[in-house]
Amino acid sequence: MIHHKKKILIVLLTVFSLFFLMTFVSHGEEVVLRIGSPNMVSTANLVFDDYLPVFAHISNPPLTKMSTEGQIVGQSAKLIEVSSDNTIWTFHLDDSLYWSDGQKVTPQDVKFTIEFIAQNVPWAGWLKEGLQDISIQEPNAVVLKFKKPHTQINRDLSSYNLLPRHIWEKIESPQDYSNPGENIGCGPFYIKKVDLNAGIITMEKNPYWKGQTPQIGKIEIHLYNNVDVLSLALEKGDVDTYYRYASSYPYQNIERLKKTERFDFVEKLNIGLYFLAFNLKRTPMSDFQFREAISYAINYPEILKLDGLGYGNIPTRGFVPNSMDHFIETELLTYDLEKANRLLEGAGYFDSDKNGIREDLAGKDIDLTMLVEPDYVRRSELIKYYLEEVGIKVSMKNVDESTWIALKDQYEYDITVTRTTPWGMMVHGSWGTAYFDSRRTGEGVLHIVDDPIFLGLVDGLLSTTDPEKIKELAHSVQSYYADTLPAIALYWNMIITPFNREFTGWQPDPLFGIYNIDNFVNLKKVL
């Protein structure tokens, strides 16, 4: 009898031990979120690579961020103050921030970061030109003084990552710097490894993070230079979600992904958009009547259907999408081939020799040079077809991104199809002004409008914090776009992001979508 009880006890202890071991293993298993992205990182440089700085937003968080409601609020800065004349901005640093090597984040780090960006980053030339002085205010604040009022600096700084001074001040050639190993960060995660051979960026928890504890243990960003291969990886379960900065999951692959029944989708109307840009420094693009005619030659329903597969809306002449604050209804862009032809002839653009090509006002056949980047070939081909339907010859010049930037900056083109990003739509004077202001510089900036009326509107937006004045000026900017057509929006599109149903708590924001700190600290895996 005693022997029998002992056997039962041994069995119970064995079962209990196995249960305890299984429970421990289950709870001790690290939760890894795997993100698939076509934003290819080419070098392990947190500042000068095209896409690693985007991925570093959660490891080296900027001073400010955009909330899910679209408001600019503090991130690394816990409090922001601005003088009555909008020339002095004070950023009070969150004193609970620590770098992943254990050193405390200081105002000196912030001062170093802003000075470094102003001096070394070409597309931050506006900061170098406008910043008069930067100083430290004890115990934990940084003060920026500008030469003239600057009401959007809190928004502009939402895209520049904090750098650890004790690391970056020792780097002699920052543009050539590459660190494939541990990159010190002060967010909830830091970059542990950048393995470009494997195409994986590994991010681990910052042991010194004192904010909300993330439920996931590690983030892996898997890079794919082929979107179809990435889509297949999602379908197979190799990655849990998709991220492409300011872009949607490929519309043509959505239905196939739905059939797996393992994914849900976040849908947001994009603040950015695709558009046809004119080089206003050349004729006939400088002629408003010519641009007006072109606006009626574009088949908006067709381009939305063929290129956007219906995931979006036909835009208005006001350019700015209705997902932005202070949107106003301007006239809807309309496809009317007969009206386009009538307007061209009314403006003096005839096909006198009946060769199918209209002549410009000097009597020469119109042959527009269209700059075409690889990502915009399909849209550009559609525009070429639409314009040639009304007798405007278009010669496509296929170029890579760097060549596009160089030719665009030299005004060596007639038209081009490009896009805005959410950040680009909201910086400078906001409402897309950064793309058109002739005084502005940057990789995607067209700087084609030097009209004093437009520049006056932009300066007004840059010099006021009065909500009613901002609203009034925002309406005026959209009306200006509608009245002058410096560019034509092709369609306003939806950003669709798929995610594995095993994860819950997704919190996308309008600026960086799912790629934000609030999202990653709130994500949970369904057990």
Image (cartoon, grey):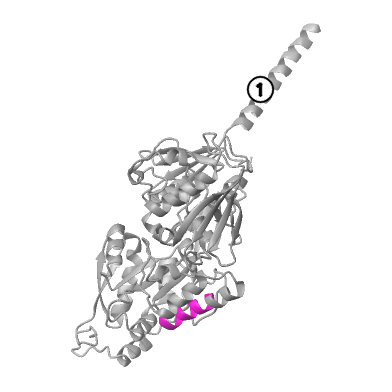
In the image, residue 346 above or below residue 496: below
User: Is residue 380 rendered to the left or right of residue 304?
Assistant: left
Of 163 and 289, nearer the camera is 163
User: Quick check: is 483 in the magenta stretch?
Assistant: yes
Q: Could you tell me if residue 510 is visible in this image?
A: no
User: Quick check: is 103 in the magenta stretch?
Assistant: no
Q: Position of residue 377 (x, y in %)?
A: 32, 64
In the image, residue 474 above or below residue 515: below
Q: Could you tell me if residue 163 is visible in this image?
A: yes
Quarter residue 292 falls in: bottom left
User: Is residue 516 rendered to the left or right of residue 309?
Assistant: right
* Quadrant of the image containing the N terminus: top right
Which kind of residue does numbered mark 1 sit on?
A: Leu
Q: Which residue is mark 1?
A: 18
Quarter residue 393 falls in: bottom left
Provide the residue span drawn in magenta. 474-484
